[in-house]
Image: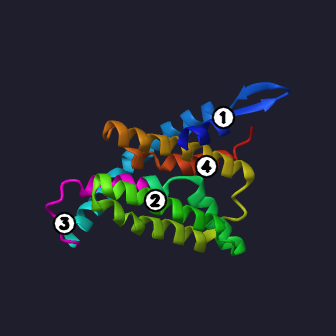
Amino acid sequence: IAISGAMEGMLTVQDGKVVSSGALLIVGCLAVGAVIGEALNIEGAFERLGQWLKVSTGNARDKTFVNAFVSASLTVCIGAMAIVGSIQDGLTGDYSILATKAVLDLIIIMVMSSSMGKGAAFSAIPVAVLQGSMTVLAGLVRPIMTETALANLSLVGSVLIFCVGINLVFGKKVKVANLLPAVVIAVAAAFLPV
């Protein structure tokens, strides 16, 4: 899903030829986003929240709790469906994208919980906070979210989802949470003069 989302945003057909675009956007957003994310240590904040949840829920002995929580949270929070669905719900009252995403998230979290542990189930907390605040704030961001901004968000978000997949397959190699500012930078890049 992540690769197809990134490829869809990067490759287009014009006059019968495949044209590539967006590579510079991805590299620039990820580079600047990584610097900001590392400075803020967003990954550390997710891990501290996971540790707090682990202790608060009586799972102090569960060694996989925090990794499951962080991986699952990033998997279901990153992506255009969360943002676009929340904005669509906030602006028009149409929650169809969020309903579809909820079904997909349920399946994903069930699979992740069975393979990684019950920490994955607690990803509902950041999902509720993210999607809830985006829905509430949709009226404020309405003038900002142009088609280009949403396309940039989707492109960079797809790359971040791919990074989460890399972590799931090969172990934690990429601090994806520290790359989250790249999504904001991608939206801001839509307003730079070309």
- Alpha-carbon distance for marks 2 and 1? 28 Å
Q: SS of the residue at dot 1?
A: helix
**Quadrant holding the C terminus:** top right
Q: Which residue is mark 1?
A: 10
N-terminal label among 1 and 4: 1
N-terminal label among 2 and 1: 1
Q: Which residue is mark 2?
A: 107
Verify CB contact (< 8 Å) between mark 2 and mark 1: no
Q: Is residue 99 left or right of residue 75?
A: right
- Alpha-carbon distance for marks 3 and 4? 35 Å
Amino acid at the residue labelled 1:
Met
N-terminal label among 3 and 4: 3
N-terminal label among 3 and 2: 3
- Alpha-carbon distance for marks 2 and 4? 24 Å
Instruction: Determine which of the numbered discs, if any, sits on residue 194 in the image.
Output: none
- Alpha-carbon distance for marks 3 and 2? 23 Å
N-terminal label among 2 and 4: 2
Residue 113 picture location, percent across and down:
33, 58
Amino acid at the residue labelled 3:
Asn
Which label lies toward us, 2 or 4? 2
Q: Is residue 175 above or below residue 128?
A: above
Which label lies toward us, 3 or 4? 3
Classify 10 Å Cα crowding around label 2: few (below 14), some (14-19), many (20 and above). Answer: few
Q: Residue at x 18, y 54 (%)?
A: 63
Q: SS of the residue at dot 3?
A: loop
Which label lies toward us, 1 or 3? 3
Amino acid at the residue labelled 2:
Ile
Q: Is residue 156 left or right of residue 42?
A: right
